[in-house]
């Protein structure tokens, strides 16, 4: 089943190379991907899918298109196009860092290090030490906000420390991960989407949401970022608290799934026949559980539970949510972007497609994502 799903996905990526041309997919409307000129936070996922397909097939056409995207990420960086946010890791880990991991291209390495330096500019030591998620420094609305999504940007900093030997990257990454663990993860193992600090003193203010149902609810994609992100933090640090936090968040995610093992958009949203799913959240967790399982002993009592959760979720994604056999641009139906904002609440999400493909290739072929050297 996994191999059939991969082959179908690779075929769709191949067709999309011609459809998309030099532009980048973001989210869809009525089954058609919205394209942009490398101006959004999601553009690295398309690059990452191309690199995954190249590793799987060895087909030079995927490599050529992937390298074309990396050149565009160079252009984007030099032109400073929409980089005033924390998602620099999503953009450059899956594009230029992926090229470095696969080909050891020195120009790709240099671009990735420049991206890590750019992410460090969002570090706010005066506010107690955190990476500001959105907006410019001093922004009256955003100055004190951190966000759980940022956990997937931290591997860029850990990697930069390994490449340069400069401890500043690692110190920032560890502090951000620890602050996320302390303030965003709740006592019952659920999570806030974001958290605010006083930007002058660093005093904690409280948790909030942006895309979830309420400030006190658990947005499923946010919980998914925590499962994968803390497992990656453990890979780089060996800190058992990060491993345990990933396990706690994974248990919560799996325990709150509906019968078909694919998440609704928020764990606290009222459930009826019209409630939106978020297949992208379950795709992230399918990839994140494989990272988590790599760090667990064979005798760990949770291992079987997580393995079953991975199998159930990925099986349901393939059988009930994928576009296998269809003429479609996306790989997964029923992803949600921003339900309360009315933005693509039931469509293709390029990150959902990426993590679905990463999870399948990792499980079937041992091909991992580009969050770390391998």
Image (tube, rainbow, N blue to C red):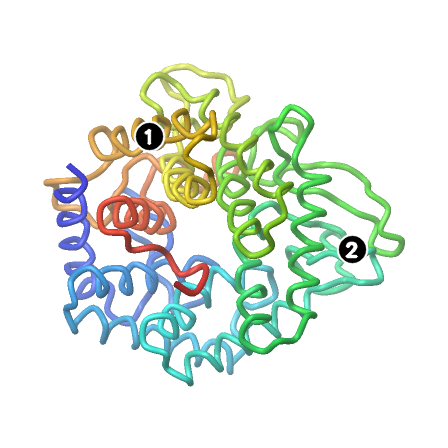
In this rendering, would 56 be left or right of 250? left
**Residue 114 at x, y = what percent?**
55, 78
Residue 136 falls left or right of residue 57: right
> How many residues crowd mark 2 within 10 Å: few (<14), some (14–19), many (20+)?
few
Above or below for 193 versus 160: above
For residue 169, which quarter of the picture? bottom right
Marking on residue 313: 1
**Residue placed farthest to the front in the image?**
299
Q: Quarter-wise, where is residue 273 in the image?
A: top left
> Are the two marked residues, 2 and 1, in contact with CB atoms closer than 8 angstroms?
no
Residue 335 locus on image (x, y percent): 36, 38
Q: Which residue is mark 2?
A: 140
Q: In front: 178, or 37?
A: 178
Point 51% across, 51% down: residue = 232
For marks 2 and 1 on the same chain, the one whose residue lies earlier in the sequence: 2
Residue situated furthest right in the rendering: 201
Q: Quadrant of the N terminus?
A: top left
Please provide percent x and percent y for residue 322. Answer: 22, 37
Q: Residue at the location (17% across, 53% down)?
A: 12
Snapshot quadrant of residue 171: bottom right
Secondary element at tag 1: helix
Q: Residues within 10 Å of mark 1 (few under 14, many from 20)?
A: many
At x 23%, y 51%, the residue is 365
Q: Choose between 140 and 107: the one closer to the eye.
A: 107
Q: Mark 2 to mark 1: distance in Å?
A: 41 Å
Total numbered labels placed on residues in the image: 2
**As drawn, is 137 to the left or to the right of 65?**
right
74 sits left or right of 155 in the view:
left
Q: Quadrant of the C terminus?
A: bottom left
Q: Position of residue 348 (x, y in %)?
A: 32, 44
């Amino acid at each position: 089943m996994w191999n059939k799903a991969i082959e179908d996905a690779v075929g769709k990526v191949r067709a999309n190379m011609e459809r998309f041309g030099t532009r980048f997919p973001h989210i869809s409307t009525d089954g058609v991907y919205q394209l942009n000129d490398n101006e959004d936070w999601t553009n690295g996922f398309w690059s990452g899918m191309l690199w995954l397909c190249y590793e799987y097939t060895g087909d030079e056409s995927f490599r050529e298109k992937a390298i074309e995207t990396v050149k565009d990420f160079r252009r984007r960086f030099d032109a400073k196009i929409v980089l005033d946010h924390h998602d620099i890791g999503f953009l450059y880990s899956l594009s230029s860092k992926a090229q470095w991991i696969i080909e050891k291209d020195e120009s790709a390495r240099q671009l990735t290090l420049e991206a890590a330096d750019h992410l460090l500019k969002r570090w706010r030591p005066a506010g107690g030490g955190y990476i500001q998620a959105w907006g410019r420094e001093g922004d009256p609305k955003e100055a004190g906000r951190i966000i759980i999504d940022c956990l997937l940007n931290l591997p860029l900093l850990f990697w930069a420390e390994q490449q340069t030997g400069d401890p500043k990257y690692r110190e920032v990454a560890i502090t951000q991960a620890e602050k996320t663990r302390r303030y965003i993860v709740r006592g019952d193992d659920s999570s806030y989407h974001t958290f605010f600090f006083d930007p002058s003193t660093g005093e904690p203010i409280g948790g909030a949401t942006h895309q979830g149902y309420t400030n006190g609810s658990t947005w499923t994609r946010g919980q998914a970022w925590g499962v994968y992100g803390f497992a990656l933090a453990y890979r780089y640090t060996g800190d058992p608290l990060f491993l345990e936090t990933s396990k706690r968040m994974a248990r919560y995610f799996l325990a709150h799934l509906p019968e078909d093992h694919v998440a609704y958009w928020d764990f606290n949203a009222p459930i009826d026949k019209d409630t939106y799913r978020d297949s992208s959240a379950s795709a992230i967790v399918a990839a994140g559980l494989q990272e988590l399982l790599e760090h667990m002993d064979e005798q760990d009592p949770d291992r079987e539970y997580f393995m079953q959760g991975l199998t159930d979720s990925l099986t349901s994604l393939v059988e009930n949510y994928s576009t296998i056999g269809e003429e479609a641009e996306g790989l997964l139906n029923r992803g949600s972007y921003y339900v309360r904002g009315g933005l693509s609440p039931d469509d293709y999400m390029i990150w959902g497609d990426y993590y679905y493909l990463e999870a399948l290739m990792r499980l079937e072929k041992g091909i991992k994502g580009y969050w770390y050297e391998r």
